[in-house]
Image (cartoon, helix red, strand yellow):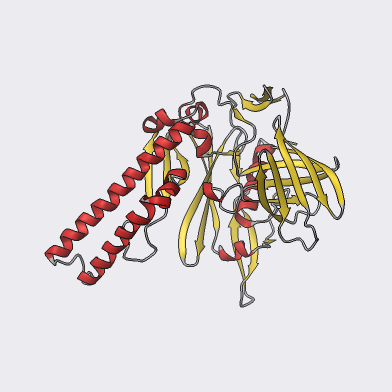
Amino acid sequence: MGWMSNQSMGKLRIFVLAGLVFWVGVAEAKRLIDKPLTYLIKNSDNSVATFSFPFIQGEDDLVAKRINVFLHVAELQMAPPELFRSEPLQAATDSARNNSEMESGGIRTLNEGRVLSVGVIYVNRGYAGKRSYEFDARNGRLLLKDELLTPAGYKLLAKQLVQLRKSRIRSQLSRLTKLLGSHTKKSPTDTPELIREEIDIYKRCLEDRFEGSGLKSQLDDPGILNVEEHSLIFTKGPCSNQSIDELGDFTNKLSAEEVKPYLSSYGKYILFAEGDGAISAINPYSQVFWGKINGKIPVTLYLGSNYPLIREAQLKRAKYYYDKYRSVIDLSVEKRGDLFELTETDSKEIPKPVLSFKIYEGKLTGQWRGGGKSYSFEAAP
């Protein structure tokens, strides 16, 4: 199990204060490497293709395990093998089929070893891209903007990013309007009709994203966070997927000094090595837990969605699997007060099996109910 009370993990300790459990201590990150796994998938025409996927190994088995479970369950909706396998493995999900040209993007250490970044390169429906996940190198915990920023800092930074993105759109509108008025062409295919169409895209974008409910959504979630070398990057999708949208994604890279007024003490540790990096043992979302049902049946729980970097998608979905069988089960999430209820969405049973729990002293404590029976449930990160 990954939870310990008043014990040490190298130089990283966990302790309880006023009912809250914290990870504290400046620990030296253990050496980790990526040994990608090879997966087989069957295409719709029955041909067989392969893709590679990150598999982390190294001196700290628990950190490597936490990252491997997170990446496999979140990205592939399947459990990772317990040990590295050199022979090709069978992929089990539609998600993997949609990413048939996926490959490992390798790992990097950032900020003097405090951050571990793992990349996944993919081609999905003809679009090539790369996703990067950044982890606290001491414990393999996903870095979240909710924890790197203070609540007040989060709001102020979101407002700043809204202004930067609005300014970018308005500058593009001004340029296109002048271009249309001069009747000059940027290229042989640049016609007044295409310029007007592009202008319409950006006008709609300003209205849809930065007024009313659209503005609220922008302020609630300023975008996907990536931690880079002494900087933070926030990314929101483009105004349009049409090829004439020249602006593309809205990506804002802010230096550590620029974001320092918005950072929590944990964020200052990650970016500046200030303090001991204390952080609550249970984060808001996208976290892996290990536990037992009825005190003897080991299970692994991932509390997060298939889109772990998108804030609004969290605390709506979860997944778990029995360690013996390693078949991932989808869960819907309902939260009433401090009680979580996770229901097996695809179960044929009536009523469907449910995991219910509350968070207390760094643990999830509650019950598993199903088939007319009820058993204790307890898990921890």
User: Which residue, as the protein is rendered here, is positioned at the far left?
Assistant: 182
Out of 105 and 194, give the one closest to the viewer.
194
Q: Nearer the viewer, residue 190 or 229?
A: 190
**Left or right of residue 153, residue 298 in this image:** right
Residue visible at 61% across and 30% down in the picture = 280
Residue 293, quarter of picture: top right
345 shown above or below 192: above
Against 27, is 62 above or below?
A: below
Can residue 313 be seen from the camera position used here? yes
**Residue 379 % position (x, y):** 75, 39
Residue 380 placement (x, y as % from top left): 72, 37
Name the residue at the bottom extreme.
Answer: 45
Task: Judge whether 325 appears above or below 221 on screen.
Answer: below
- Number of callouts: 0
| Residue 56 image point, x, y percent | 62, 45
Residue 205 sits above or below residue 9 on the image: below
**Picture residue at 75% right of the left edge, 56% below the top:** 327
Direction from residue 300 to residue 234 in the image, left or right: left
* Relative side of 109 to 38, left or right: left
Q: Answer yes or no: is residue 248 visible.
A: no
User: Residue placed at 72% from the left, 53% from the top?
Assistant: 343
Quarter of the image with the C terminus is: top right
Residue 321 coordinates in the image, percent (x, y): 75, 51
Indicate the quadrant containing the N terminus: top left, top right, bottom left or bottom right. top right
